[in-house]
Image (cartoon, rainbow, N blue to C red):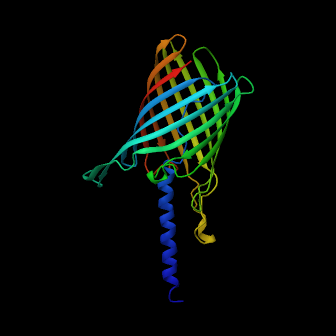
Amino acid sequence: VSHSPLRRLLKIFRVISVCFFIFQTALFAFTPLRLKSLPSNSIELATLLELHDDVYSNDINAFAEFSLNSQLSFLGELSYRTFSFEQEMDASFNILHKGTNLSVSGFYTFLLGVKFFPVEFLGASLDWAIPIEKELGFQKFHSVSGEFLFLYPFTNWFEFSLAQEFCFYIPTDNFSLGSEIAIQWQGIFKISKWRIEHISEFRQRVRDSKNKSLAIPYQKQNDRFSALRFKTAVYRNLIEKSFDLDIGISYEVAKGFLYGKETGHKFSIESRFSW
C-alpha cells in the first residue's frame, strides 16, 4: 500500500511523456498540402524554408505524376531535409541558445499514390506515405489516405475544386495514431502567363490515439486536435510548346495543435515541368 502513491506518480509521468511524444510526431504526421488536379504528366521540384515551433528548416521536395490516360495516373513524392536551425529565446526575446542541427539531415517521407477519374469532374485518389528514416523524428507512421475529388472549370480563367480526405495510420511500436478527416477547397486563377493558386484545408482527428504499452485505463490519449492550413502560390509560365515550364513561389501557414504548439510558416520556390 505504501508504494501506491509512487506507482501513481510513475503512471502520471508516463502519460505526460506520451503526450510530449504526440506533440513531436503530430507536427509532421500529415501529407503535404498539394494542389488537386486531373490526371496528367508532370514533375515538380521545390526547395522550402520552414519555421515551426522556433525551429528553422530547409527541405527539398520532388513530386512526379505519370498518367496512362485522361482517367488514371500514378504519382510519387520524396522529401529530404538538409538541416535545421533552432533559436531559443526567453520571455523578453533575449537569445538563450542557437545552433544548427545537421543530425536531422536525410530522406524522411516517401509517398506513392494513384488517381482515378471515372467521369470528367469527379474522381478519387489513394495514397500511401512510407517513413524512411524514423530516427529523424518526422514521419514515424505509415499512413493510408483516400480522397474524393471534385474539380470544375467555371471559366477559362477560374477553376474550383473540393476534396474530402480520410487518413488512417498503421500502429507502430504499440502506439496507434488517431484517424483524421480533412476538407480541402482550392481556387485557380489564370491571367495571361500568370497562375495564382490558393488552397485551404481544415483537418480534424476523429479518433483518439492509443498507447497500448500502458494499462488499459491510460491508453487513450484524448488528442482529438484540429488545425487549419492555407497556401497561396504564384506561377509564371516560361515555356509553352510541346511541354510547359512554370516557375513560382508559395507561402503556407499552419495553425492548430494537430500540427504543433505554434503557428507554422513555410516559404518555397517551385518549378513545374508538364507535358
Viewer-proximal residue among 125 and 187: 125
Residue 94 x, y percent position in the rendering: 24, 52
Q: Position of residue 270 (x, y in %)?
A: 44, 27
Count of marks, rendered view:
0
- In the picture provided, is 90 more to the left or to the right than 151? left
Q: Tell me what residue is drawn at x 30 percent, y 55 percent.
A: 91
Task: Residue lying at the far right in this picture: please name it.
Answer: 118
At 62% from the left and 53% from the top, the residue drawn is: 170
Which image quadrant is residue 77 in? top right
At a point 60% along the width and 14% down the height, the residue shown is 156
Seen in the picture, residue 192 relative to 88 is either above or below; the reply is above
The residue that appears at 57% across and 15% down in the rendered structure is 157
Residue 248 location (% of width, % of height): 44, 24
Q: Quadrant of the N terminus?
A: bottom right
- In the rendered image, residue 218, in percent from the top left (x then y), is placed at 59, 69
| Left or right of 247, for residue 69 | right
Locate the C terminus and report the quarter of the image it occupies: top right
Regarding residue 251, the answer to whether it shows in the image is: yes
Give the answer, above or below, for where 152 lies relative to 176.
above
Q: Looking at this view, is 218 or 111 the one in front?
A: 111
The reply to whether residue 37 is in sight is no
Hey, which residue is sitting farthest bottom in the picture? Answer: 1
